[in-house]
Image (cartoon, helix red, strand yellow):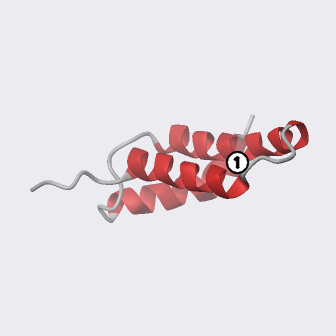
Amino acid sequence: MYGTSLAPLQDILERGQRAGEFRDFTTRTMAMTVRAAIDAIGPQISVIPDLDLDAYARDLVSLFRHATEQEVRP
């Protein structure tokens, strides 16, 4: 579905992993998931006109932060 359009996002994720900022995960899967979360909001706005976009954005940031952050070891 996404073909090569995920390449820029995958590159960002790979650079984050190499820099030690992100944990180990499959970057294509994560890039597809990020893209799908962004793409999903359009149809939701049309059926839920009072959808709280700020809350949606905060939730996505939190979700992806937890999914990608490098574990902090004591």
- Percent of width and height locating residue 37: 66, 43
The 10 Å Cα crowd at callout 1, few under 14, some 14 to 19, many 20 or more, is few
Report the residue that reaches farthest toward the left: 74
- Percent of width and height locating residue 6: 65, 49
Of the pair 65 and 18, the residue shown nearer to us: 65
- Percent of width and height locating residue 14: 44, 56
Of the pair 28 and 61, the residue shown nearer to us: 61
Q: Quadrant of the N terminus?
A: top right
Element at label 1: helix
* 19 sits to left or right of 27: left
- Say which residue appears at 53% left-offset and 37% top-offset: 29
- Say which residue appears at 29% left-offset and 61% top-offset: 20
Q: Quadrant of the C terminus?
A: bottom left
- Say which residue appears at 32% left-offset and 49% top-offset: 23
- Say which residue appears at 33% left-offset and 65% top-offset: 19
As displayed, is residue 5 above or below residue 40? below
Q: Which residue is mark 1?
A: 38
Instruction: Name which residue type carries label 1.
Output: Ile
- Percent of width and height locating residue 64: 49, 49
Report the residue that reaches farthest toward the right: 46
* 73 sits to left or right of 4: left
* 48 sits to left or right of 61: right
Query: What is the tally of numbered marks visible in this picture?
Result: 1
Report the residue that reaches farthest toward the front: 50
